[in-house]
Amino acid sequence: MLLLTTLDSCDAGSSTATVPPLRQSLCFSEETEITTECFVELMAQTMAAAYGYAALCSATSAKTCYIVGIEKFEYHPPPTHKSLFDYPLRTWISEDMVVGAMKVMQGKVLLQNTLIAQATIKVFVEPAQEERNS
């Protein structure tokens, strides 16, 4: 279920992406409530797209990542549920702290420049095959 369509920026530990209006998604309808997991998934897809892009640029294999915890999640509902289906969403993810293979990421989802969700996500980054063999 890939929801984002564009990786807008990707640099030193921070990335942004665009998600088209959810009405264009096969996964949602205006009668469906959008769960908090959906917003965490958008943040995770932004992170995965950034890691994939970095791997492509360096001609290496993309690393496999697993969300192992959500430390904090906040949801700020938009004025109307329908607005989630009318406007694109923007996602932002940034590495906050790295300890070995563990990363703490800060993520945000915006609707027309208004923050609607944010989370602190703990991620395990599986070492690449080359790193495991060395």
Image (spheres, rainbow, N blue to C red):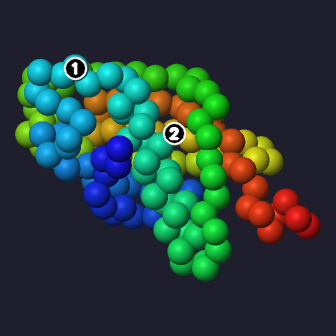
- C-alpha gap between disc 1 and disc 2: 24 Å
Q: Name the residue under label 1.
A: 33
In the rendered structure, the answer to whether residue 5 lies left or right of residue 60 reads: left
Work out whether 17 lies above or below 89.
below
Q: Quadrant of residue 61?
A: bottom right
Question: Can residue 112 be seen by looking at this rendering?
Answer: no
Check disc 1: other Cα within 10 Å, few if <14, some if 14-19, many if 20+. few
Identify the residue at horizontal 35%, vertical 44% (top origin): 1
Tell me the element at label 2.
strand
Q: Where is residue 53 in the image (x, y as percent from the top left)?
A: 49, 68
Q: Where is residue 83 in the image (x, y as percent from the top left)?
A: 10, 32
Tell me the element at label 1.
loop
- Badge 2 amino acid: Gln
The front one of 26 and 90 is 26
Outermost residue to the right: 134
The front one of 131 and 77 is 131
Identify the residue at horizontal 76%, vertical 56% (top origin): 127
Identify the residue at horizontal 43%, vertical 48% (top origin): 45
Q: Mark 2 points at which residue?
A: 106
In the rendered structure, the answer to whether residue 118 lies left or right of residue 116 reads: right
Question: Can residue 56 be seen by looking at this rendering?
Answer: yes
- Badge 1 amino acid: Glu
- Which label sits in the foreground, 1 or 2? 1
The front one of 51 and 109 is 51
In the rendered structure, the answer to whether residue 86 lies left or right of residue 115 reads: left
Q: Where is residue 58 in the image (x, y as percent from the top left)?
A: 61, 78
Work out whether 50 lies above or below 108.
below
